[in-house]
């Protein structure tokens, strides 16, 4: 049993004065000695927090006690070390950046793909009339993905809407979308339905829940997560490694950020190349004057900035009056 818990969750639920909520929620998390990363938007919450089992339990109870977030599902990992160093809670336009901000067009509370529990997803994914669609970014699916999944060449989820035309060939089939924890699929599946795809489903709880409840069967590689663990094991049934070192081609599951802060690219790199290149993706990045010290993890802590609710409010007002 791990000494700490790490919670992964999201909830699409409207928040009035979300900027101020972010300020208050940050203080609340700090009062519980939690560390993590939470995004607050007018449309809801998206977070990963880490702390003692007692602090995490208190946090889950507090979130569920708020009627707006009563339906929130938490995915709980037991970990030996805290998954973050600091506590971040920031207001942003969306809880996952998609560019689909108009609730009149895409609203996960009104229409999404059919939610499939992990066991149901496992039974459907290999059927002839099914296409399994990975809606994550390149650096995520490069380190792990379902067997025979369709992947998209995107650097960020906000590029997903541009890829819909490439998926036209799959109209008439059942589309099973998946992502890390389910949050991206809420909007991806809703957009697919809006664009005329009729049989759209999504893996409820994402890869993380699939690993816990279905043993991760047929998920090749590891799952990228947005904390200092970087990747986590998912498959305990038929595991494999699918990623290779960008520099030498050796099979490796290790993913890092380039030590050059101006590059900061996510990529897979073996330990030998990591030591030789000091955690950089190339010799060029090694010469950067602000190159960060490589400690073997390739994870670098961002310095948190305080939430300025007044500034955010003024910015939103300017957007409204345009």
Image (cartoon, helix red, strand yellow):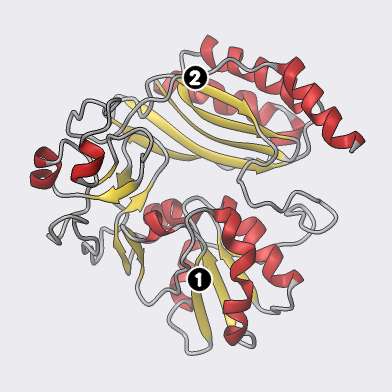
Which type of secondary structure does the marked residue at label 2 adopt?
loop
Q: Is residue 34 above or below residue 266?
A: above
Q: What x and y, as percent, mark residue 230?
A: 33, 41
Sequence-first tag of 1 and 2:
1
> Is any part of residue 70 visible from this angle?
no
* Label 2 Cα crowd, 10 Å radius (few <14 / some 14-19 / many 20+): few
Count all numbered tags in the image, as a single digit. Answer: 2
Mark 1–mark 2 distance (CA, rounded to whole Å): 34 Å
Image disc number at residue 23 = none
**Quarter holding the N terminus?**
top left
Left or right: where 297 falls relative to 313: left
Q: Which residue is mark 2?
A: 304
Residue 302: image location, x then y, percent: 42, 25
| Residue 85 image point, x, y percent | 37, 21
Quadrant in which residue 265 is drawn: top left
Residue occupying the point 29% across, 40% down: 258
Res. 257 image quadrant: top left
Q: Is residue 209 visible?
A: yes
- Numbered disc 1: secondary structure: strand
* Relative vertical location of residue 155 with respect to residue 134 in this rendering, above or below: above
Mark nearest the camera among 1 and 2 is 2
- The image shows residue 69 at horizontal and vertical percentages of 69, 35
* Above or below 189: residue 171: below
Residue 133's label in the rendered image is 1
Residue drawn 27% across and 32% down? 288
Quadrant, the C terminus: top right
Q: Is residue 11 left or right of residue 84?
A: right
Locate residue 207 relative to residue 299 in the image: left or right.
Answer: right
Which of these two is toward me, 284 or 48? 284
Image-quadrant location for residue 62: top right
Mark 1 burial class by Cα count in 10 Å: few <14, some 14-19, many 20+: many
């Amino acid at each position: 049993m791990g000494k700490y818990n790490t919670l992964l969750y999201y909830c699409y639920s409207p928040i009035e004065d979300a900027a101020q909520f972010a300020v208050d929620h940050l203080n609340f998390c700090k009062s519980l000695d939690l560390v993590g990363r939470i995004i607050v938007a007018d449309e809801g919450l998206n977070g990963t927090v880490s702390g003692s089992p007692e602090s995490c339990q208190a946090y889950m109870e507090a979130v569920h006690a708020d009627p707006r977030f009563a339906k929130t599902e938490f995915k709980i990992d037991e970990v030996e070390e805290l998954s973050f160093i600091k506590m971040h809670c920031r207001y942003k336009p969306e809880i996952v950046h998609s560019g689909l901000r108009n609730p009149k067009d895409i609203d996960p509370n009104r229409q999404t793909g059919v939610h499939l529990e992990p066991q149901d997803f496992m039974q459907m994914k290999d059927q002839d009339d099914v296409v399994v669609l990975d809606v994550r970014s390149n650096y995520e699916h490069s380190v792990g993905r379902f067997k025979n999944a369709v992947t998209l060449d995107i650097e960020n989820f906000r590029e997903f809407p541009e890829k819909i035309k490439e998926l036209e060939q799959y109209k008439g089939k059942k589309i099973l979308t998946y992502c890390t924890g389910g949050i991206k699929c809420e909007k991806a599946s809703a957009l697919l339905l809006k664009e005329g795809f009729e049989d759209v489903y999504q893996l409820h709880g994402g890869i993380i829940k699939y690993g816990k409840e279905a043993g991760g069967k047929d998920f090749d590689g590891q799952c990228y997560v947005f904390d200092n663990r970087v990747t986590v094991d998912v498959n305990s049934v038929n595991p494999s490694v699918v990623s290779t070192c960008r520099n030498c081609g050796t099979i490796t599951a290790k993913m890092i950020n380039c030590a050059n802060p101006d590059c900061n690219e996510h990529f897979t790199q073996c330990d030998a190349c990591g030591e030789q290149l000091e955690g950089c993706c190339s010799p060029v990045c090694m010469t950067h004057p602000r190159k960060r010290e490589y400690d073997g993890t390739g994870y670098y802590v961002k310095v948190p900035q305080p939430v300025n609710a007044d500034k955010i409010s003024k910015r939103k007002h300017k957007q409204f009056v345009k």
